[in-house]
Image (tube, rainbow, N blue to C red):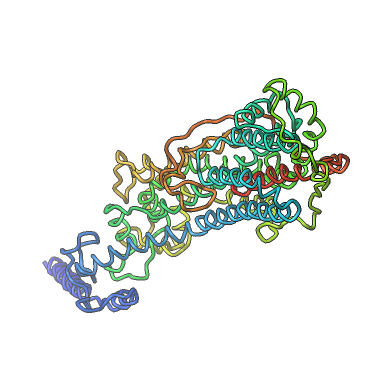
Amino acid sequence: MYAMWGLQVALCTLSVLSLSSGGESKARSCSEVRQAYNAKGFSLVNVPHQEISGEHLRVCHQGYTCCTSEMEDKLNQQSKLEFENSVEESSHNMRTTFVSRHKKFDEFFLELLDNSEKSLNSMFTRTYGKLYMQNLEVFQDLFTELKRYYTGGNVNLEEMLNDFWSRLLERMFQLLNSQYHFTDDYLECVSKYTDQLKPFGDVPRKLKAQVTRAFIAARTFVQGLMVGREVANRVAKVNVVPACVRALTKMLYCPYCRGMPGLKPCPNYCHNVMRGCLANQADLDAEWNFFIDAMLLVADRLEGPFNIEAVIQPIDIKISEAIMTMQENSMQVSAKVFQGCGQPKPLGIGRSARGISDMFSVRFRPYAPEERPTTAAGTSLDRLVIDIKEKLKESKRFWSNLPDDICAKGKFTESDEEQCWNSHTKGRYFPEVVKEGLTNQVNNPEVEVDITRPDTLIRQQIMALRVMTNKLKNAYNGNDIYFPDSSDEGSSSGSGSGCSDGCTTEFVFVGTEAPVIRADRSDERAAAAGKSPSRGPSIMLLMATLTLPLWASQTQWR
């Protein structure tokens, strides 16, 4: 009997102590929460000093809490903002790389083209004066077409260069046969003999192969940098869906409501939340890696056989060689043209070939190395390519690593897996970490992800990368895929990209058949020095015509 009475007393005592403990729990202070909440920039008006009943909460635990409904709403917004900022910050260096390198390459080629045009124009005007000015439109038309190609125009480089040589033949043929009168129809007949007579030797074929492949590689590479920049910028502006916001708030700020504002999430907890919120971004990774690999392949070409500097620098010598070949074979060429096109009508006696030998007496003098214009503050293409290759390699697997990179920064996670927020209290987080990608989120314990509805923007960027990768692979092989002519639509950038938002739709395949031939400057200078042209002015004109355009094309590709 006494034993039973003692047990009842003990139970009553425990009950009283339990109730006392519960009362103390209800009265727990929210001072730390108020301080942390205020540090976020929020007002402390209506923020409780002690815990209150939490039935009003929609995200956090509905037991006793330091959060009101208004506080939870603000913390929801804060979670979304911090997540968006974290994605922006984590991708900042990678996005900046594409922006800055695109700008560098673009400026490099534009400056290379600009310097070529200005230098040759100055030299030819000073040396040949009126003769050069009379043929100026040949250069202007070529530069116009090169510029249009660089800015995304539907220009076939092979056809354009063929047309240039044909026009060059017409001009030179007239200068070498100035005792005759030629009609437009006759000159058109002359141009038809370009391939058959090969008046410029093998230079046009070799130069066309070198210029075409180098320019295709250069323009496509710059376009690739632009596409990478645009894709990265768009994907970094993440679309935060309500389910993600809910999970972020629960992870980042529900500890506030539980009176533990300094408690950070457990690492694996963070990984699951971030992989759920960035599931669509991770799906971009495979196509992104293919794109980066293709960019690296074209970069290798730019360092090697498709080096546009190696093509542009010896262009003056190549043109000089071509023009000297034409002069040496002028009699045979003229005879065959007269035979095929008919005998032209001679001019009056007073307007025969008087003074022609004097006109051509000035020999073309190539640039000395120290006279050549520098580009991009002396930056060489090789240095630019080496730099960008390192940056491109660093950007591989960026999107699949992004969730873990954000968690690893320490801002969101606690390294001690026993002293961290596990979604409901302080302690170890037990659920397994799901894999990256949309389909793997079906079992994500923290974020409700609808795997049947992929993000439209991400799918668009995947397609943009796929098209650009295809273009890069063709450029690697010396082939061109060009988009519909954008010049008529007001392409205003002036950059080599030529791509706006509509740059990822149609494309057309154009093949270049001529083999790549590396420029050998020493041999060409020796050849030029060993052949003294008897009729310089005409040669100079023709040389300038080719030189400026070709330099132009290189620059524009950049």
Residue 451 is drawn in which quadrant?
Answer: top left
Is 438 above or below relative to 479?
Answer: below
Q: Residue furthest top?
A: 339
Q: Nearer the viewer, residue 90 or 382?
A: 382
Q: What's the residue at 46%, 40% (across, down)?
A: 485
Q: What's the residue at 43%, 63% (across, down)?
A: 414
Q: Nearer the viewer, residue 11 or 508?
A: 508
Name the side, left or right, on which 65 lies relative to 177.
left
Is 325 above or below relative to 277?
Answer: above
Residue 244: % across, % down: 31, 53
Q: Nearer the viewer, residue 168 or 145?
A: 168
Quarter holding the N terminus? bottom left
Name the side, left or right, on which 144 lies relative to 529.
left
Residue 391: % across, % down: 59, 52
Is 557 above or below relative to 79?
Answer: above
Residue 23 is drawn in which quadrant?
Answer: bottom left
Name the side, left or right, on which 267 lies relative to 171.
left
Q: What's the residue at 17%, 72% (across, down)?
A: 19
- What is the tally of numbered marks visible in this picture? 0
Residue 290: % across, % down: 52, 39
Residue 177: % across, % down: 74, 34
Q: Residue furthest right?
A: 530
Q: Nearer the viewer, residue 403 or 6?
A: 403
